[in-house]
Each structure stands twice: as structure tokens, then as C-alpha cells.
Image: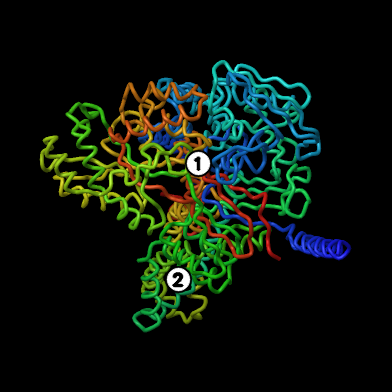
Amino acid sequence: MKAAALALALATSTALGAFTIGFADAQERGGTLNFARYDGSKLVDPIYADRNPDIWMVGSLFSTLLAPTEDGTDLVGSLAESFEVSSDGKTVSLVLRDGLKFSDGSPLTGDDVVFSLERARNPDLGPWSGLLSAVSSVSADGRDITISLETPDPALLSMLATFNTAIVSKKAFDAAPGANDQEKSAAIFAAGGPGVGSGPFYLSGFEQGSSMTFTANPHYWKEGKDGKPLPYLEKVHFEIIPDDATRVLKLTAGEVDIAEFIPFSRVAELDADPAVDMNLFPSTRIIYSPINTRETRADGTPNPLHDKRVRQALNYATNKEALIGLVLQGAGKPMSSPVMSSSTRLAADMNPLYGYDIEKAKALVAEAGLKPGTEITLTTLAGSADDGTIFAALQQMWAPLGINLVAEQVDNATRGAKNRSGEFDIHTYGWVDDVNDPSQVTGWLGYFPTAKAVGTGWNNADFNTLYEASSSEMDPEKRADQYRKMQDIYAEAAPLLFMYETPFAVAVSGKVDGYLQTPLGNNVFENVSLER
Amino acid sequence: MAGLQYTLNRILLMIPTFLLVMIIIFLLVRLLPGDPAIAIAGDKASDADIAAIRERLGLNAPLWTQFWLFLTNTLQGDLGRSILLRAPVTEVILARLPTTIFLTLYAVTLSILIAGPLAFVAALNRGKWQDNLIRAVFQVGLSMPVFYIGLLLLTFLAAQLRMFPVGGYGETFLDRAYHLFLPAVTVALYTSAILMRNLRSAIIEVLDAEYVQFARAKGLPPRLILGRHVLKNALVSTVTLLGLSIGQLMSGTLVTETVFAVPGVGRMMLEAIFARDYPLIQGLTLTFAVLVSLVFLMTDIFQSWLDPRMRLS
């Protein structure tokens, strides 16, 4: 009986082994993935990447010490095999994996980690140094890394999983031509080739504004399903195609395998195409409109939007579901937290956040004494079909409140300048998180010292105090409570027109498997394979 | 000798033109609303970051100081560094200029090849069905926006029939001619419509001229009359129009290069304007101004060869 059981076990394991080998052999490898991008990268360097087309590519060329889990709710080791935070929250200890290499085969050591993190926190260099402002020193002893902090920082681990703390090769920077770090970085990027990063690929071709090519890093530390090093692809070739219609045509003509930023009006049509896999990746992207809350407008006249009740009324009178239907063809959902997307950690679920209630809105404007025919200007992006639709819809939705909504069309740079100077009533805007922590978006939207609460001029002492306290609160429950209170205060004050969340619409050819765009927007190619 | 003097005078006239262009470019760029420092730093930057960028770029210096710097550097061939592309402006323009020049010359060649023969057919068959058909077809070309024609061509000839690539610009000369055929045709359809109408009218006018009637009376063969007397004289006004069209074609590349994903300086200009990249906008505008001035110079020289009276005036 025992022998029979053993024979059965052997047979089963052999069959399973054969199945596994068969499965592993079935894993496609090699080939070039052609990707149509809406905009090109200018400089993919962890600390100088300041535009999404640069930021979202950093992870393909450089690895970070930690990485978010697939659902984005937790962190796991990446270059670091283990990590821990001291009980006082002022020391973070990490241990690097054994045998790590850069893409040219040179070893990745503790010195490279120290060099990279010192670079990342240097305020004279990149724009992201503030994310590591709590760090006082970084040291290495073999594979052991120690990060000391002046004050505890609950977001620090998330920062170690963020693009700006990705590890670069000290040797490559020492050898690069240039008088300073900026020039060295530009020279390394212009030259391309392996050596500076340890991500799944290295830059092997770049034509400004036209194309970019990544080649597989043969020394990448992560393994694929078949037990061999990732990535599966040999190359990724990017073509810069700013026109939406042309990107879609390139995909349907088979000239590219993936087209990003598909207009929502084309989603249903591509979804029906059997040769295309139309993806709507969950994102941290929110669309909202800052409201000028100052007592007077920029021209010195009284500002009707200074009254909280008017701002609340505008929110109640806005039918978000209708807007989502008009602008996104239904591919979105109303904001349920006032200061972040629902996929950002610590987001409160306040759904419905100012659900459509026109009677309540009318009562609020009556209570506030808003004069019928009050003119309010909505500043929109010139040439944006979405903004045009939003304006037309809001004009109708707010008319019952006696509001005469007029449009002012400007380009992006002008809109940014108006936001800074406060020369607006309401304007369209959007946001995507760059870090896997709510502190960045909350600081941007609500904390006055950062950017005048996204230009609204809203300055709430309670909110600001809570935000400051949360920045060094290491107790997860207390921090979650602080965030809950901040969201309550913000929702009540309504310095924004809370609108909706949108996914990343990416059309992928049916022969592509494993492509992912993370909620932060990062393009992940390491698990992509091409059916041949 | 008169021809050489005329050419030299035309070249000297370009100097004040360029100076004026530089003043206009400098002022126009700074009249644009929006702050380049905000465009560079991005929406998420703090006020302190923006102030630091303004200082670094010299945007806090008085306007005349900025202009003097722009003028002296430009005269030394230094157009500054692109804020957006973080590279010398001269370098990035030179890298993408050949593509735009190729596209423009390609479109001009196609325009001439389309407009020339059809203008002759229409003029020689004035009022007949051939004339009416040609004019009607070109009227459609004139009345449709360039980007719409481009999208139609892309949809049918590239995406559906797969005769041409949807975008890109190729590697070798022939490959490039193949890749840029659709964008060139898109632009050429509009330009050739204008050229054809003008050349047709000019031919009709010349055909009625006394010296042509005299040539006919002398019994010269029609081919000789058309080649020697009609074409040369009819071309005078068409060459002027062609020169103007080339200037228009270059500005038209802003749209064409975006729709067809052609990485030329037209698309770069759009990116530079949106990013408020002052040095790059100035460099590109100056480049366009130089190219258009050169085209006008060549047009004038060619015209003076066609019509020697111009040299004397």
C-alpha cells in the first residue's frame, strides 16, 4: 500500500514537473515591443525627472531599494532583501540582496546606495529633495545600509520605493564628462548604453522628440516565471505620437503594439475590436477644479466664492455622474475622498461626496444671499475638448442657481500662472500621485504653505496643524485618524469643485501579455512578452 | 553685372530684416502670458522652486539686458540652451531641421508636379469640361482644412489599405520619401490648388497677349510657343506665389508634423510654445525667418532671370 502511494506520489510529481517545465518552456521571450507615447522623455534620471513622461520611465532603467506591492497597499523589498524601522522611528536599516549588478555587469554596492540617496536629498540638485528632508545621514557597511533621520517620517519607506530614490552607479557618474552633476547626468543620458542603472532595461537609443529604445539588462536581479532573469522582451521601442487619432491608427494598422492615453470617446470602439485589448488601468488621477476662496478677486472686487455656502452649493449642483458620462463616456467614478483618489492610501470613502442635490444647492445660495446673474469665470484649457464639455455642462447645471458661468480659455502655462497668482474664479485641473503615500497630494491640495492649497488661498489652521503632526506620526492608527479629520475639514470647506477619478486608458495589441501601468502612472515592461 | 548688383543689394537688405525680426521675436515671446519658470517646474513645484528657476534663467534681469544678451549671443552663433530639452538650441534645431526641409521641398515638388500640367490642360481647354472638372476638384482641396485631409489620407491609405505607414520618417532617402509621402501630399494638395489657379489665369492672359498671337501668325509650332513664350512669361507671377507658399508651407508643418508624427522643427515649435521655452522659440523663429528670407531671395533672383526688367528697376 505504502509502495503504491509512493508510486502515485512519484507519478504525480513527475507529471506536475513535466507540466511546469512545459509551462516554463511556453513562456515567450525576445522580440521588440513598439509603444506609441503621447509625449517624449527629455531626461530619465531619478532626481531630475520632473515631467510624467520622464518619471514614468525611471523604473524601467533604475531599481529602487523597496517597491510597492501590486495592489499598492504595502511595500516589499526590491534591491533590499529586508528592511526595518527602529522603535523610535529615527533609523531605517536595510540589507541589500547578494550579487546585485548594474546593467554593464559591474557590482552594485552600498557606496552606490549612499551616493544615490545623498544625491536625491541634495536641495541644490533635483526638485524632489524635499521628499527626503527628514534624513540626516546615509551610511553603508557592506550590504548593510543605515538611514538616520532627524525626526521620524512615516512616509520614508514609501519614498524608498519612489523613482527619485532609485539607485544609480557612482562609478558611471564619476567617469562621466561634465563640470557638475547636472552636466554629468545629461552626458550619461545622451550617450546611452548600459552601466548607470540596474533596472530591467538600459537606454540604447534616443532621438529627441522622436523615439527612444530600451534594451534588456542581462544582469537584472529579478526572475521570470521560467526561472530565467527578467525581462522577457529584448527591446522596447517608443515612438512619440502626440496626436490621439494617429496613435490609435498606428495601433489598428499594426505598426505599434501599445498606444497610451486613448481618448475616452474611442474606448468603446477599441474595446469591440477583437485584435485589441482595451485596458482601463486604475489610477490615482483625479480631475477637480480649484475655487478661489479669497475675500476679494484679483481685481479687488468682492469674491462671491469666498462664502463656503456658495462653494458647497456649486458642488451639490454639479451632477458628477452626468459629467463622467459626457467626458469619460462612463469610464470613471466620482471622487469619494476630497483630497485624493480612492486608490491612494488612507483615502476616506465619503461616497457620495456632495451627491447631486439641486434643491439643497438652491437653499445654500439663497442663504448666502447670492445675487441672481452673478458672473463666475471658469478658466479652461484652450483646445481641450474635455474642458469644453465640462464648461458647457456646468453652465447648464449652475444656471438654476442664478449663476452666469463664462469661459476663459488659456494654455497650460497661463493656467499655471493664474493658479499661482490667484487671478481666477475656478479653473480645471488634474493630479496624479508621484509617491505611494497620501502626504504629497494632501500637502498639495490642502496644506497652505506648500502652494496656497492648490492656489485656492484656503488657509485652515486646524488642517495645517493636523498635516504637520501627521508628517512625523509613526503610529499608523493615529496617522489614519489625522487623515480622516483632514478630509472631513476639507470636504466641509469645499475649496474645490470635487469632480471625478479617471483610469489610464491604454490599448494593447492582442499579442502582448503582461503590460501594466501602475496607479502612479509608471509604465512596467519587465513582465511583458510578445506572442510570436 | 546688373544681375550681380541686384543680388548683392537683395542680400544686404536682409541684414535690417533680420535685426527687425530679432526685436519682434524677443518682444513677442515675452508678451506671451504665462511664466516659463512655472512651465519648467511643473504644477507641483513650490513657490520657492519657481523663484530659484527664474533667477537661474536670468528672467529677473531687466528686459533690455536680456535683449542685449540675446543679440550678442545670437551674432556669435549661440542661441542659448533649450529649457525644455536641456541642450544647446542650435544643436537641437540642426538635428530636426533636415526633416522639415525635406518635407517642405517634397511638398513643393509635388505641388509643382500636380499644379503645372493641370494648369496647362485647364488653360488650353478654357471653359470646357476638362477645365471645369480640374477647377472643381481643386476647389474641394482648398476648402478643406489641412489636418482633415491628412486624417482622411491616414485613415484610408495608411490604416485601411496599408499602402503607406501611419507615421515616422524613415532612414534612407527612398525610405524617407516613402514615409513622408502622405504628409507631403496633404500639404501639396492645398498649395497646388492655389498654384494651379494662378498659373491657369496667367497662361490664359499670356495666350491672349499680342506677342503670342504674333508668334502664332509667324507659324511657329504650338510646342515652341508654349515652351518659349507662354510658360516663361506666365511663370513670373506664379514664382512669386510659390515663394510665398513655401513660407506658408513651413508654418503649415506645425500641423502636418503633429498629425503624421514627423519629428521636425514644426512640432518642436509647438512643444516649445506650450513649455514657454524662450530660447527655443526664439531660435526656431529665427531659423524660420532665415529660411523664408532665403526662399524670397531665391525667388527674386529667379524672377529677375525670367523678367530682366526687374534688375533695372
At which x and y percent is residue A437? 51, 34
Left or right: where does residue A423 sit relative to residue A96? left
Q: Amino acid at mark 1?
A: Leu
CA separation, marks 1 and 2? 40 Å
Left or right: where does residue B246 sit relative to residue A323? right
Compare marks 1 and 2 and give the one earlier in the sequence: 2
Q: Chain of mark 1?
A: B
| Quadrant showing the C terminus of chain A | bottom right
Q: Nearer the viewer, residue A236 or A232?
A: A232
Numbered circle sitting on residue B230: 2
Instruction: Provide the secondary structure element on which disc 2 rests.
Output: helix
Q: Nearer the viewer, residue B69 or B150?
A: B150
Please tell me whether residue B4 is drawn above or below residue B235 in the rendered image.
above
Q: In the figure, residue A222 lies in which quadrant?
A: top right
At which x and y percent is residue A92? 64, 24
Please tell me whether residue A106 is drawn above or below residue B222 in the rendered image.
above
Circle 2: is it few (<14), some (14-19), or many (20+) Cα within 10 Å? Answer: many
Q: Amino acid at mark 2?
A: Val
At which x and y percent is residue B9? 48, 41
Q: In the figure, residue A301 lies in which quadrant?
A: top left
Q: Visible in this render: residue B304?
A: no
Residue name at image x 25 percent, y 45 percent: A407
| Quadrant showing the N terminus of chain A | bottom right
Residue name at image x 30 percent, y 55 percent: A322
Please tell me whether residue A505 is drawn above or below residue B201 in the rendered image.
above
Left or right: where does residue B247 sit relative to residue A382? right
Name the outermost residue toward the bottom.
B129
Please tell me whether residue A315 is drawn above or below residue A452 in the rendered image.
below
Q: Nearer the viewer, residue B236 or B142?
A: B142
Residue linked to disc 1: B284
Q: Chain of mark 2?
A: B
